[in-house]
Image (cartoon, grey):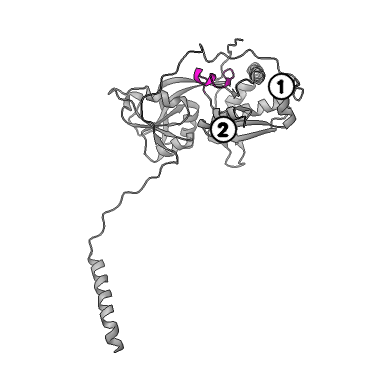
């Protein structure tokens, strides 16, 4: 009875196993290549090209001579920073060589970090009395408008559109928008990228520049927007875009991190970096310009650029003020 009771189920199981072993192997499935969270195709009409409604956007407010650290004018924005005990600065943490975490120490370092520390030194007398608030490019202006940061030192291009929303300092670094591609790529410039995917960080001027560019076939590139600069590096390494485009200082960092990449092509647009402050904080803006003037004159700014980016060639020797 016991053998009879198990005979039928056993026969069914053996039949199933035999059927499985005879089944034609399934076709191989292509691996899924995940994209960074927030990645999007920037569709719709092209954003208007950069305007000059404010005249030359590089022109900033005339600086005031910085007072001694810790001795800020009563009632000023700088005095409030002294009372708090620290300067709060919006910044990135993953953009070599501008602002990133040193893999050995974990400390933030880079061009923008060093400039921010000089601002803390000028106000408080100590470059370490700064609190960095990590933010994406798209969060820079909202954080200034909400008052959650005192200033933004984060590869922020000076434009008329931004100056209508916030205050922007004189130029401290002259970057330019270019392309980075794999060394094995035949792409030599934007003319080769009509209809092809090109990555750029959301909330940056690079998006509009790409939207208004045309390949040799008359088509614009397919703009792939991502939240962080480093997301473009990931997409490029995974082969999900043909190129990335943003400021050349940032792209140089990509090529340093991955020797298979190369910066190519002529400049697509100028990207003059300025420090952003909240609207109405003209005292802080004039103070920042005064500190930048001193840093240009005594070689501090050139020294920072040389030690972080590798050259002081993009540090403007002189700037223009009005008002």
Numbered disc total = 2
Disc 2 to disc 1, C-alpha distance: 28 Å
Q: Is residue 152 above or below residue 108?
A: above
Front residue of this view, candidates 287 and 270: 287
Disc nearest the viewer among 2 and 1? 1
Query: With 175 as the anchor, is 14 left or right in this view?
Result: left
What secondary structure is the stretch in magenta mostly built from? loop
| Location of residue 193 (image quadrant) | top left
- Residue 205 in the image: x percent, y percent? 46, 24
Instruction: Give the residues in magenta.
Output: 157-171
170 is within the stretch colored magenta: yes
The residue sitting at 51% across, 22% down in the picture is: 157
Q: Is residue 276 visible?
A: yes
Q: Earlier in the sequence, mark 2 or mark 1?
A: 1
- Residue 308 in the image: x percent, y percent? 57, 29
Q: Residues within 10 Å of mark 2 (few under 14, many from 20)?
A: many
The residue sitting at 45% across, 16% down in the picture is: 51
The residue pinned by badge 1 equals 76
- Residue 257 in the image: x percent, y percent? 48, 37
Q: Is residue 97 visible?
A: no
Query: With 220 as the anchor, is 273 left or right in this view?
Result: right
The residue pinned by badge 2 equals 99
Q: Is residue 311 above or below residue 225?
A: above
Quadrant showing the N terminus:
bottom left
Query: With 42 as the anchor, is 154 left or right in this view?
Result: right
199 is within the stretch colored magenta: no
Outermost residue to the bottom: 1
């Amino acid at each position: 009875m016991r053998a009879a009771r198990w005979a039928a189920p056993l026969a069914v199981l053996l039949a199933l196993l035999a059927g499985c072993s005879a089944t034609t192997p399934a076709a191989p499935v292509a691996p899924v290549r995940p994209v960074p969270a927030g990645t999007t195709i920037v569709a719709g009409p092209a954003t208007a090209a950069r305007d000059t409604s404010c005249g030359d956007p590089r022109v900033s407010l005339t600086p005031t001579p910085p007072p001694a650290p810790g001795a800020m004018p009563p009632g000023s924005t700088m005095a409030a920073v002294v009372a708090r005990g620290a300067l709060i600065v919006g910044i990135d943490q993953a953009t070599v060589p501008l602002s990133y975490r040193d893999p050995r120490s974990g400390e933030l370092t880079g061009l923008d970090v060093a400039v921010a520390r000089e601002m803390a030194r000028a106000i408080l007398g100590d470059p370490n009395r700064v609190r960095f608030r990590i933010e994406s490019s798209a969060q820079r202006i909202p954080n200034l408008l909400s008052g959650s940061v005192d200033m933004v030192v984060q590869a922020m291009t000076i434009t008329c559109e931004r100056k209508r929303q916030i205050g922007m300092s004189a130029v401290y670094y002259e970057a330019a928008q270019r392309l980075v591609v794999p060394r094995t790529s035949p792409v030599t410039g934007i003319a080769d990228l009509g209809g092809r995917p090109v990555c750029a960080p959301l909330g940056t001027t690079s998006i509009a520049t790409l939207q208004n560019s045309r390949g040799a076939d008359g088509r614009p590139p397919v703009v792939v927007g991502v939240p962080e600069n480093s997301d473009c590096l990931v997409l490029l390494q995974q082969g999900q875009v043909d190129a990335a485009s943003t400021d050349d200082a940032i792209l140089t960092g990509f090529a340093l991190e991955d020797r298979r990449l190369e910066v190519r092509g002529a400049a697509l647009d100028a990207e003059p970096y300025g420090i952003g402050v909240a609207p109405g904080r003209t005292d802080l803006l004039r103070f920042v310009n005064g500190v930048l003037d001193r840093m240009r004159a005594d070689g501090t700014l050139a020294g920072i650029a040389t030690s972080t980016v590798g050259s002081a060639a993009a540090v403007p020797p002189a700037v223009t003020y009005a008002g």
